[in-house]
Image (cartoon, helix red, strand yellow):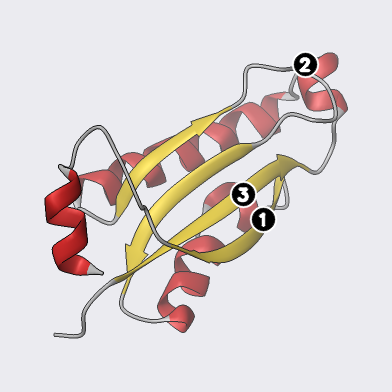
């Protein structure tokens, strides 16, 4: 099995008014699918962290930090996100590496570098 690399995808609403004026029923349904998709990926030890800013203007965004075997596998994870696939959120994918975290001691990270 290939060693998994870390990635980050940043998401923002395609329709900024979704945050300022409220989501449509269709957007609400798709965001619920998005949340469940991420929960499933957490259960599979793929997603390491997911969350969003608490702002409700154009600057609002969410991030998902996850692991994948390849860049192509990472792209599939992003594109299979129901909110991305259904164009409720736009996404940007970045190779990523967690340098420090509250969950891992620094000496464990040094062994992986």
* Quadrant assignment for the C terminus: bottom left
Horizontal side of 11 relative to 73 (left or right) equals right
Foreground label between 1 and 3: 3
Location of residue 2 by image quarter: bottom left
**Residue 77: which quarter of the image?**
bottom left
> What element does badge 2 sit on?
loop
x and y, in percent, of residue 104 in the image: 18, 42
Question: According to the image, label 2 marks what residue?
Answer: 22
Q: Which mark is residue 91?
A: 1
Distance from the alpha carbon under mark 1 to that under mark 3: 5 Å
Give the secondary structure at mark 1: strand
- Viewer-side label of 3, 2: 3
Say whether residue 46 is left or right of residue 31: left
Residue neighbourhood size for the residue with mark 3, other residues' Cα within 10 Å, grouped as few (<14), some (14–19), many (≥20): some
Q: Residue at x 74, y 22 (%)?
A: 23
- Which SS class for mark 3? strand
Q: Is residue 68 above or below residue 13?
A: below
C-alpha distance separating marks 3 and 2? 21 Å
Q: Is residue 63 depicted above or below 29 in this figure?
A: below
**Residue drawn at point x = 47 percent, y = 82 percent:** 72
Residue at figure coordinates x 67%, y 35% from the top left? 61
Q: Residue at x 13, y 52 (%)?
A: 107
């Amino acid at each position: 099995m290939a060693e998994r690399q870390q990635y980050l995808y940043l998401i923002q609403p395609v329709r900024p008014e979704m945050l300022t004026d409220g989501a449509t029923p269709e957007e609400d349904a798709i965001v619920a699918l998005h949340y469940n998709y991420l929960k499933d990926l957490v259960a599979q030890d793929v997603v390491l962290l997911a969350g969003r800013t608490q702002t409700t203007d154009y600057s609002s965004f969410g991030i998902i930090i996850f692991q994948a075997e390849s860049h192509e596998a990472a792209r599939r994870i992003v594109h299979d996100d129901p909110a991305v696939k259904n164009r409720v959120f736009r996404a940007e994918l970045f190779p990523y590496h967690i340098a420090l975290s509250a969950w891992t001691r620094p000496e464990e990270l040094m062994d992986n570098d």
